[in-house]
Image (spheres, rainbow, N blue to C red):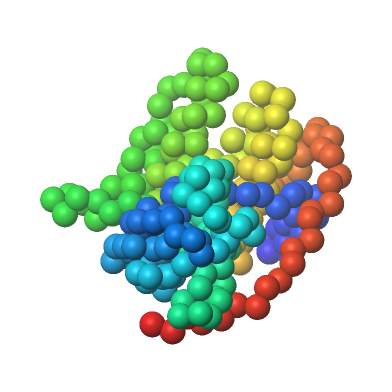
Amino acid sequence: MRLYVLFFITIISFSTLISPVNAQSIFSGMVFSQKEEGLKIVDVQSGCPGFDAGLIKGDIVLEIEGKKIDSLSDYVKISRKIKDKKVEASLVIVRKGVEYDVVVMVYSIPINKNWKEKVVKPVKLSRRLTKTPYIYWVGKGYRTLKKNVSNKPVDVRIENHNKALQYLLNALHYRPESIDTALQIASAYRTLGSLYIEKKLVKESVINYRKSIKYFDGCYRKTDKEDYLHKVLTNLQEIEIELSKIKSDKTEPALETKRKSLSIPQ
């Protein structure tokens, strides 16, 4: 069974594309002012993404994502461009006359470590919540998936599945070892893939199938239970059939240029 599942994972994975991910604001919790030499950080709230990346008050931001920042309007343009599209951003800053490369990120480290996907970490819940964060989010995800939207327009079904998926990913952040949650996420990505086919959006369809395969692959590697492996195999077989109906563009991925990173002294 395991060898058979591995065969399907290998074959299907090579036929799909690597996908981008969505994100919340990377620059929340930071205040900037315009200076002649660049954008000066005048405040960094404790616990915000910039604080976690090592940024401090007085740092001068020269570049964001390779774009030179000369004014607040430049910052506004680039921050709007990457908002809801990235979970990390590269910055070039100056501190005491020395330039540093910094990466500000908002993705869930437990999910990235266990499942190799960069998704936004969940917001903090109210302290008055009686349930654990995992129970809260996984319950919300399952309830959203059970909503009867089968007779609704495809856009409504896509929106509902994306909401459910985000709730389940929030749950996985708190319990990254959960195979059941990961399988549900894999199935949700697969359903989104088929919904985007229905909407004739090939690129979005392939992106979601690719993510589905990644999670099924992860589940395969983390368990020996026959019922889990059977579920993985069944889904991969069905995904292979669905992917065979897609004629996607064979676009070469852009080459990435590497820049030397320096650790920032505090």
At 44% from the left and 36% from the top, the residue drawn is 163
Q: Locate residue 20, reporting x and y percent.
A: 63, 49
Q: Is residue 100 above or below residue 123?
A: below
User: Is 242 on the left-hand or right-hand side of 63?
Assistant: right
Using the rendered view, name the quadrant where residue 143 is placed.
top left
Residue extending farthest to the bottom is 265
Q: Locate residue 128, reporting x and y percent.
A: 13, 50
Residue extending farthest to the front is 36
Q: Nearer the viewer, residue 251 or 55?
A: 55
Q: Locate residue 47, reporting x and y percent.
A: 31, 65
* Residue 70 visible to the viewer: yes
At 56% from the left and 68% from the top, the residue drawn is 92
Quarter that holds the N terminus: bottom right
Q: Locate residue 257, reporting x and y percent.
A: 74, 67
Q: Nearer the viewer, residue 93 or 171?
A: 93
Quarter that holds the C terminus: bottom left
At 65% from the left and 30% from the top, the residue drawn is 196
> How many labels sit on residues?
0
Q: Nearer the viewer, residue 219 or 265?
A: 265
User: Is 29 on the left-hand or right-hand side of 208?
Assistant: left
Q: Nearer the viewer, residue 142 or 100?
A: 100
Residue extending farthest to the left is 128
* Residue 114 visible to the viewer: no
At 50% from the left and 22% from the top, the residue drawn is 156
